[in-house]
Amino acid sequence: MKRYTKDEIVERATEVAKMISETEEVDFFKRAEAQINENQKVREMIASIKSLQKQAVNFQHYGKTEALKMVEEKIEKIEEELDEIPIVQEFKQSQADVNDLLQIVAATISSTVTDEIITSTGGDLLAGETGSKVRNSTAGRCD
Protein backbone atom coordinates (compact mmCIF):
# COMPACT_ATOMS: atom_id res chain seq x y z
CA MET A 1 0.00 0.00 0.00
CA LYS A 2 1.41 3.39 -1.02
CA ARG A 3 1.64 6.00 1.68
CA TYR A 4 1.16 9.64 0.73
CA THR A 5 2.74 12.69 2.33
CA LYS A 6 0.82 15.82 3.29
CA ASP A 7 2.61 17.66 0.48
CA GLU A 8 1.43 15.09 -2.08
CA ILE A 9 -2.13 15.36 -0.81
CA VAL A 10 -2.03 19.17 -0.91
CA GLU A 11 -0.67 18.94 -4.46
CA ARG A 12 -3.58 16.72 -5.49
CA ALA A 13 -6.04 19.01 -3.67
CA THR A 14 -4.62 21.93 -5.66
CA GLU A 15 -5.23 19.95 -8.85
CA VAL A 16 -8.84 19.31 -7.80
CA ALA A 17 -9.26 23.02 -6.95
CA LYS A 18 -8.03 23.94 -10.43
CA MET A 19 -10.48 21.44 -11.93
CA ILE A 20 -13.32 23.00 -9.93
CA SER A 21 -12.30 26.48 -11.10
CA GLU A 22 -12.73 25.26 -14.68
CA THR A 23 -16.29 23.98 -14.25
CA GLU A 24 -19.43 25.34 -15.86
CA GLU A 25 -20.64 26.47 -12.40
CA VAL A 26 -17.57 28.62 -11.78
CA ASP A 27 -17.62 29.97 -15.33
CA PHE A 28 -21.25 31.05 -14.88
CA PHE A 29 -20.36 32.63 -11.51
CA LYS A 30 -17.56 34.68 -13.12
CA ARG A 31 -19.87 35.91 -15.88
CA ALA A 32 -22.65 36.80 -13.43
CA GLU A 33 -20.21 38.65 -11.16
CA ALA A 34 -18.86 40.62 -14.13
CA GLN A 35 -22.40 41.61 -15.12
CA ILE A 36 -23.11 42.77 -11.57
CA ASN A 37 -19.92 44.84 -11.50
CA GLU A 38 -20.86 46.42 -14.84
CA ASN A 39 -24.39 47.31 -13.69
CA GLN A 40 -24.48 50.91 -12.42
CA LYS A 41 -27.82 50.51 -10.60
CA VAL A 42 -26.64 47.42 -8.75
CA ARG A 43 -23.33 49.08 -7.81
CA GLU A 44 -25.17 52.12 -6.44
CA MET A 45 -27.55 49.94 -4.42
CA ILE A 46 -24.63 47.94 -2.95
CA ALA A 47 -22.82 51.20 -2.08
CA SER A 48 -25.99 52.46 -0.35
CA ILE A 49 -26.25 49.25 1.67
CA LYS A 50 -22.60 49.50 2.76
CA SER A 51 -23.04 53.13 3.79
CA LEU A 52 -26.22 52.34 5.72
CA GLN A 53 -24.49 49.37 7.41
CA LYS A 54 -21.78 51.75 8.70
CA GLN A 55 -24.48 54.05 10.05
CA ALA A 56 -26.18 51.08 11.69
CA VAL A 57 -22.96 50.11 13.46
CA ASN A 58 -22.60 53.67 14.78
CA PHE A 59 -26.22 53.86 15.90
CA GLN A 60 -25.88 50.50 17.63
CA HIS A 61 -22.64 51.61 19.33
CA TYR A 62 -24.28 54.78 20.68
CA GLY A 63 -27.51 53.04 21.67
CA LYS A 64 -29.73 54.93 19.22
CA THR A 65 -32.31 52.18 18.82
CA GLU A 66 -34.94 54.16 16.86
CA ALA A 67 -32.39 55.41 14.33
CA LEU A 68 -30.92 51.90 14.11
CA LYS A 69 -34.34 50.44 13.41
CA MET A 70 -34.96 52.97 10.61
CA VAL A 71 -31.59 52.29 9.00
CA GLU A 72 -32.11 48.50 9.23
CA GLU A 73 -35.50 48.90 7.52
CA LYS A 74 -33.87 50.95 4.72
CA ILE A 75 -31.21 48.26 4.29
CA GLU A 76 -33.86 45.54 4.12
CA LYS A 77 -35.87 47.53 1.52
CA ILE A 78 -32.82 48.00 -0.72
CA GLU A 79 -31.84 44.34 -0.33
CA GLU A 80 -35.35 43.30 -1.38
CA GLU A 81 -35.16 45.57 -4.45
CA LEU A 82 -31.72 44.18 -5.24
CA ASP A 83 -33.01 40.60 -5.00
CA GLU A 84 -35.68 41.42 -7.61
CA ILE A 85 -33.05 42.20 -10.25
CA PRO A 86 -32.59 39.14 -12.50
CA ILE A 87 -28.78 39.39 -12.72
CA VAL A 88 -28.59 39.46 -8.91
CA GLN A 89 -30.79 36.37 -8.75
CA GLU A 90 -28.52 34.65 -11.28
CA PHE A 91 -25.42 35.68 -9.33
CA LYS A 92 -26.83 34.34 -6.06
CA GLN A 93 -27.83 31.10 -7.77
CA SER A 94 -24.34 30.76 -9.23
CA GLN A 95 -22.83 31.30 -5.77
CA ALA A 96 -25.09 28.56 -4.41
CA ASP A 97 -24.15 26.21 -7.27
CA VAL A 98 -20.41 26.69 -6.67
CA ASN A 99 -20.92 26.25 -2.92
CA ASP A 100 -22.92 23.05 -3.54
CA LEU A 101 -20.09 21.69 -5.68
CA LEU A 102 -17.54 22.47 -2.94
CA GLN A 103 -19.79 20.81 -0.33
CA ILE A 104 -20.12 17.70 -2.50
CA VAL A 105 -16.33 17.47 -2.88
CA ALA A 106 -15.77 17.94 0.87
CA ALA A 107 -18.46 15.37 1.78
CA THR A 108 -17.08 12.89 -0.75
CA ILE A 109 -13.56 13.20 0.65
CA SER A 110 -14.80 12.87 4.22
CA SER A 111 -17.01 9.83 3.63
CA THR A 112 -14.41 8.12 1.44
CA VAL A 113 -11.71 8.55 4.10
CA THR A 114 -14.08 7.16 6.73
CA ASP A 115 -15.08 4.20 4.52
CA GLU A 116 -11.42 3.46 3.69
CA ILE A 117 -10.50 3.44 7.39
CA ILE A 118 -13.37 1.07 8.21
CA THR A 119 -12.63 -1.24 5.27
CA SER A 120 -8.86 -1.30 5.78
CA THR A 121 -9.29 -2.28 9.44
CA GLY A 122 -11.74 -5.08 8.62
CA GLY A 123 -14.64 -3.14 10.04
CA ASP A 124 -18.35 -3.07 9.35
CA LEU A 125 -19.29 -0.41 6.77
CA LEU A 126 -23.02 -0.70 7.45
CA ALA A 127 -22.53 -0.18 11.18
CA GLY A 128 -19.84 2.45 10.57
CA GLU A 129 -17.45 0.70 12.96
CA THR A 130 -13.74 0.05 12.54
CA GLY A 131 -12.29 -3.44 12.84
CA SER A 132 -10.96 -2.85 16.34
CA LYS A 133 -14.38 -1.67 17.49
CA VAL A 134 -16.06 -4.75 15.97
CA ARG A 135 -13.47 -7.10 17.49
CA ASN A 136 -13.74 -5.50 20.94
CA SER A 137 -17.51 -5.17 20.99
CA THR A 138 -19.36 -7.14 23.65
CA ALA A 139 -22.64 -7.00 21.72
CA GLY A 140 -23.85 -10.46 20.75
CA ARG A 141 -21.43 -12.29 23.02
CA CYS A 142 -22.58 -14.91 25.47
CA ASP A 143 -19.65 -14.98 27.93
Image (spheres, rainbow, N blue to C red):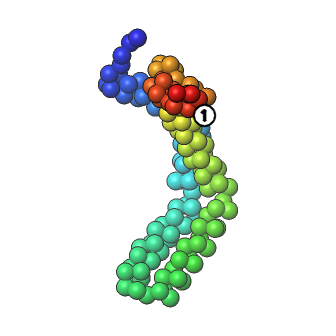
Give the farthest residue toward the front. Answer: 143
Mark 1, other Cα within 10 Å: few <14 / some 14–19 / many ≥20 = few
Q: How many marks?
A: 1
Give coordinates of residue 93: x percent, y percent.
63, 49
Residue at position x 42%, y 82% from top?
A: 59
66 to 29, vertically: above or below: below
**Residue pointed to by mark 1:** 24
Q: In the figure, 125 relative to 58: above or below?
A: above
Q: Position of residue 54 (x, y in %)?
A: 41, 73
Q: Determine whether, in the image, residue 84 is placed left or right of residue 16.
A: right
User: Can residue 52 be seen?
Assistant: yes
- Determine which quarter of the picture holds residue 97: top right
Residue type at mark 1: give it.
Glu
Question: In the picture provided, is 53 more to the left or to the right than 93?
Answer: left
Above or below 140: residue 72: below
Say which quarter of the image contains residue 31.
Answer: top right
| Residue at 57 percent of width and 78 percent of height | 73
